[in-house]
Every structure is written in C-alpha cells, then in structure tokens.
Amino acid sequence: MNAAAARADLAIIPTAAASLDIARAWSTLDALGDVPSIVLLTHTDPRTVLYRSAMEALDEEDIPVFARPIKPSEKLRAQGGRYPAKLFGYGDIALDLLHMMKENAR
C-alpha cells in the first residue's frame, strides 16, 4: 500500500459507518501519513445514528469526507462483474473528483 500511496495524488478510503469499519479507516489514514486522503462512506444510510456519529468523528479530526455517502443497495450488489446499468451515487463521486482535479489545477 505504501508504494502505491506514495505515487497517489489522492487516496480514497472507502468505509462503512459501523464502528469496526471506521476503526480500519483510521488505521489506513494513519498508515498513509501525509498522503492527501478523503473518506467515502459506503453502504451507509445518512438517516442513521451510525452515519451521524461517523461524520462527527471524522469532522472532529478534520478528515475530508465526500459530501454524499453511497447508500446500501441490493441492486448495486447484484450488478457485480457487469457494466452497471445505474451508478447508485458513484457518478456523483466521480463528478466530485473531477471538480477537485480542476480546483487543484488552478
């Protein structure tokens, strides 16, 4: 991971909002050190206490987080291995990344 991270312009840390998942995200963020990183909350319902708790914890540590989480979806899981018919929020993430790249190019 360290060799890939050293070459990365940005590391995206996907994680669910559950406590064990967030703990792994913290470990990953620590291992990345000074590599620019952003957390992507996946399989997460923004209406839940878990989501709000995860967001508060990340915010307290000034960890960047994508504005929109990827909500849980059985249809998304069922698309595995095929070209997706629907992007289930990942299209918004791609647009956010394009916007970040344009901002950094200035």
Image (tube, rainbow, N blue to C red):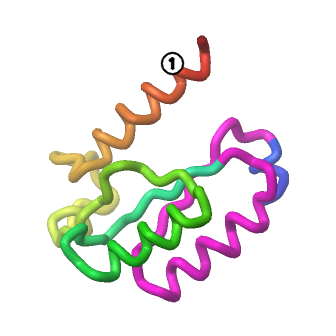
The C terminus sits in image quarter: top right
Which residue appears at 48% of the width and 87% of the height? 19
Q: Is residue 11 magenta?
A: yes
Task: Give the residue at x 79% y 40%.
Answer: 7
| In magenta segment, residue 89 | no
At a point 80% along the width and 57% down the height, the residue shown is: 33
For disc 1, the neighbor class at 10 Å (few under 14, some 14 to 19, many from 20) is: few
* The one of 57 and 38 positioned closer to us in this rendering: 57
Find residue 71 and report its horizontal and vertical position in percent.
24, 64
The region drawn magenta spans 7-36
Q: Is residue 45 above or below residue 93?
A: below
Q: Position of residue 48 (x, y in %)?
A: 23, 78
State the image coordinates of residue 66 (x, y, percent, origin top left): 42, 50
Is 98 on the left or on the right of 63, as rendered?
A: left
Q: Quadrant of the N terminus?
A: bottom right
Question: Quick one: SS at disc 1?
Answer: helix
Type of the residue with mark 1? Lys
**Is residue 63 toward the left or the right of residue 72 in the image?**
right
29 displayed left or right of 6? left
How many marks overall? 1
Q: Which residue is mark 1?
A: 102
